[in-house]
Image (spheres, rainbow, N blue to C red):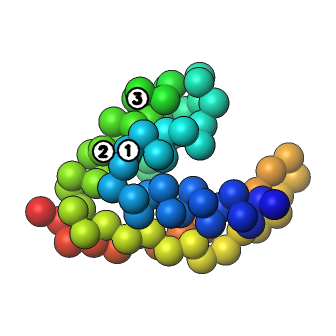
Amino acid sequence: KLRDFARRYTAAWCSQNPQSVAAFFSQDGSLRVNDGPSAVGRPAIAEVARSFMTAFPDLTVVFDDLVPRPGGAEYHWTLTGTHN
């Protein structure tokens, strides 16, 4: 089930629909990119996704692996695209 979730999350990133990405998070969930501040809540998460989708209009995400960890899992992925 978790791998299926990861595949659907990957498809959301490839959809060019930021709300599709944000829908994978709880209402007060958060997403942090690298060392940046956390985006908290679905609207903020959608804006992070939108910024990637705008910066990389041909964005493609590939699901590489899912690594079980205590209390969760690590989602490994590769993002490719041409920065505009």
Rendered image: mark on residue 18: 1
Q: Which residue is mark 2?
A: 50
Q: Which mark is residue 44?
A: 3
Q: Is residue 41 left or right of residue 67?
A: left
Q: Quadrant of residue 29?
A: top right
Measured from the top left, where is residue 77 in percent x and y? 54, 69
Marks 2 and 1, the one that precedes in the sequence: 1
The three-letter code of the residue at mark 2 reads Arg
Per the model, the C-alpha gap separating discs 3 and 2 is: 10 Å
Residue 3, which numbered label?
none
Q: With 53 as the anchor, is 2 left or right in this view?
A: right
Q: CA distance from mark 2 to mark 1?
A: 5 Å
Element on which disc 2 rests: helix
Q: Is residue 82 left or right of residue 77?
A: left
Which residue appears farthest toward the right when viewing the image?
70
| Residue 75 seen in this snapshot | no
Callout 2–callout 1 Cβ contact below 8 Å: yes
Report helix, strand or loop for mark 1: helix
Q: Residues within 10 Å of mark 1 (few under 14, many from 20)?
A: many
Which image quadrant for residue 76?
A: bottom right
- Indicate the amino acid at tag 1: Pro
* Rendered view: 36 above or below 84: above
The alpha-carbon separation of the residues under discs 1 and 3 comes to: 10 Å
The correct choice, above or below, for 44 with respect to 81 in the image is above
* Structural crowding at the residue carrying mark 3, measured as other residues with C-alpha within 10 Å and reported as few (<14), some (14–19) or many (≥20): some
Residue 81 picture location, percent across and down: 27, 72
Quadrant that contains the C terminus: bottom left
Q: Are marks 1 and 3 in contact (CB under 8 Å)?
A: no
- Residue at the image position 74 percent from the left and 66 percent from the top: 3
